[in-house]
Amino acid sequence: MPVAGAIETSAGRSIAGGDLTTGRAAFIERAQTRGDLFVEQPYGLYSEANQETWRRLYRALAGKWERYAHPRFLDGVARLGLDPDRIPRLEDINRFLEPLSGFKARAVSGYVPAYLFFDCLRRREFPTTITVRDGDRLDYLPEPDIFHDLAGHVPMHTDPAFADVLVRFGEAARTAALRVRDGDCRSVESALRALARFFWFTIEFGLMRRPGGAGLCAYGSGLLSSAGEIAHSLESRRVQRAPFQLEWVVNQSFEIDSLQPLLFVVDGFRHLEGEVRRLERWLGEGRLDNVAPGEPAVSREDLRSFLDAGRQ
């Protein structure tokens, strides 16, 4: 086994200089080759460049969090003791997180098939990316990284009401899987699109009325982990901020590689939980078996994860 801070060559020799940059981390490539989805966080592999990327991201967002983020997100940052200067160790995060909401961050080597991801939420586990985005492209994120997951998502997981919403979302996915009929891929694809769109416009890019009703704030992780997106979402005249309507949300496509032109606003966490429960009910009744086509595309892997879960 190589020492921390080294990587193995294809010949099995260890060389210095390994890191955990997204897209070029040898540790992740080896785990994926072995088929290991859940992994340990090899903290010693973070390079100084990785740590500097974390510091730059944190500095870029700290002031914007104070201005734009939901107060419960700010409470979560404080409760987790996030270090502005060092990438967190997941074991330290979980030591603070689990007593607050029962959730824990669990390191993964890459993409988690849709049903497994949602089922992790149902079990109060959050699949957490351990790589760090390229420091040359701080605000471009083609896939999640540890800053998006730990600084964008996890502070909200300290709040019991929000944590319960995530668990309910996992239950909604389970309801969808249990309706699987042999060979009925169309309705499964439709349910998957509805789930993905709901998750995108709430957990990832959701806006909420501030406590007391004075203005709006961000609670979605995609907003909270992007210095450009968070200000754009609440300040730009080019953004349509619409009251949350389930019928609209589940039929609304989105793009992942541009600033969001349309966002939905919920009144509070009770409102959000009520909409998740309504989503689950509609999935169970078959009312989402034919939502509008378009983005996101449903991959074969995601489709198979639901079909397999439904047949167990």
Image (spheres, rainbow, N blue to C red):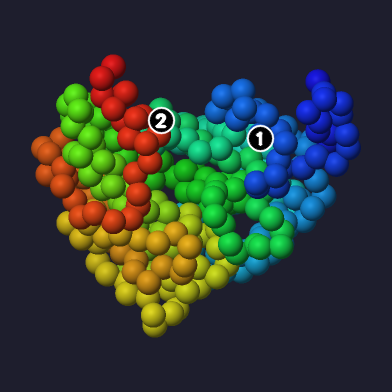
Q: Nearer the viewer, residue 307 or 116?
A: 307
Query: Would you say 258 lies left or right of 19 here?
Result: left
Distance (Cα) linking label 1 and label 2: 19 Å
What percent of the width, then of the height, locates residue 268? 31, 57
- The tag on residue 132 is none
Q: Against 148, is 26 above or below? A: above
Q: Residue furthest front?
A: 11
How crowded pointer 2 is (Cα within 10 Å; few <14, some 14-19, many 20+) is rated as some
Residue designated by label 2: 116
What amino acid is found at the position of numbered circle 2 in the picture?
Answer: Leu
| Residue 97 can be seen, yes or no | no
Query: Would you say 192 lies left or right of 105 here?
Result: left
Name the image quarter holding residue 243: bottom left
What percent of the width, then of the height, locates residue 275? 23, 49
How crowded pointer 1 is (Cα within 10 Å; few <14, some 14-19, many 20+) is rated as many
| Residue 213 can be seen, yes or no | yes
Q: Residue furthest top?
A: 312
Q: Against 102, is 269 above or below? A: below
Quadrant of the image for the N terminus?
A: top right
What amino acid is found at the position of numbered circle 1 in the picture?
Answer: Ile
Residue located 25% across and 30% down the image: 177
Q: Against 218, is 31 above or below? A: above
Q: Do the residues under discs 1 and 2 have CB atoms within 8 angstroms? A: no
Q: Nearer the viewer, residue 140 or 275?
A: 140
Residue located 32% across and 40% down the image: 169
Camera-near label (1 vs 2) is: 1
Q: Nearer the viewer, residue 32 or 85?
A: 32
Residue designated by label 1: 28
Query: Would you say 173 lies left or right of 58 here?
Result: left
Mark closest to the chain's N terminus, 1 or 2: 1
Residue located 28% across and 17% down the image: 312
What percent of the width, then of the height, locates residue 56? 71, 62
